[in-house]
Image (spheres, helix red, strand yellow):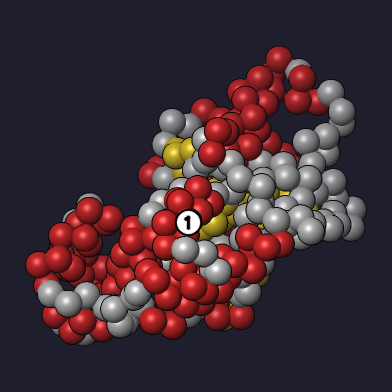
Amino acid sequence: MKTPFEQIQNDEGSSFRFLHQKVIAQQFPWNYHYHPEFELVLVFEGTGRRHVGNHLSYYEDGDLVLIGSNLPHAGFGYDALGVHEEIVIQFKDDFLGEKFFEKPEMNLIKKLFERSQQGIQFYGETYEKVRDSLIKLIDLSHFERLIGLLNIFQALAESTEYHLLNSYDTRYDFNQKDQLRLKRIYEYVEQTYQQPINIREAANIAHLTVPAFCNYFKKVVNQTFTDFVNEYRINKACQLLMTEMSITDVCFECGFTNNSYFSKVFKEIKGKSPLEFKKLVLRK
């Protein structure tokens, strides 16, 4: 059984789907799925998990991602904290006509769609500019949204502020067995990240030997299990550092056994020390 297919229905009177929602993040399931429509996702703010193709990472202060046709992905509200607000636009490659994006004026946008098959995450001024443009679409008519969407496509196509989330040679076809296995592994990490995590237990949950589990996890998630656990813990630490909790308390609360190793891993993943991060978020 393959990754679940999601049926997308355009908004009435529109050639694409426009969704603006604000919900409690804990309501989001781990709903890994695919659909033939391209998907542009804007997360307004906050921290959460992005899972596109076999790329798995965390975003902070919002996110902006373009997902290509039939590229499997999970909901961006999964593992987020508090209220999750997002805009999602879903459209087929021919939503403006079969040959529309073959026009010479659409050349950059066509290349953008081609790159999106790897998943594209935008940042910097591009994120800010497109975020503002997407928010303006909320109150517009269908026609005005269409014109605005084309301008957004062009802004994304011209941007150099992006990361490709997957490479073609590492894309993986998740079947139902993989989904259930990964779900069990993720749940194990979520339930035990505050304690020492035993890789043998994780391998047993996956019904694999330790060497087979390490190879499998690296192939499917594109990072080692140890790196995944550290990234998960650091993401939880970021959430706690936004409170008045001390750095030492955050360190032990997130499963690290000493401050020096916690600081080292934190800086490797976030590019700044826990203290620098805490000062930054508390200033906002």
Screen quadrant of the C terminus: bottom left
Residue sitting at x 54%, y 56%: 51
Q: Residue furthest top?
A: 104
Q: Is residue 237 left or right of residue 123?
A: left
In the figure, residue 178 lies in which quadrant? bottom right
Screen quadrant of the N terminus: bottom right
* Residue 133 visible in the shown view: no
Type of the residue with mark 1? Ala
Q: Residue furthest front?
A: 209
Q: Position of residue 89 (x, y in %)?
A: 69, 52
The answer to which of 120 and 128 lies nearer the viewer is 120
Mark 1 surroundings: few (<14), some (14-19) or many (≥20) residues within 10 A: few
Residue sitting at x 42%, y 56%: 211
* Residue 230 visible in the shown view: yes
The answer to which of 282 and 141 lies nearer the viewer is 282
The answer to which of 248 and 255 lies nearer the viewer is 255
Q: Is residue 97 left or right of residue 135?
A: right
Q: Residue at label 1?
A: 212
Residue sitting at x 42%, y 67%: 47
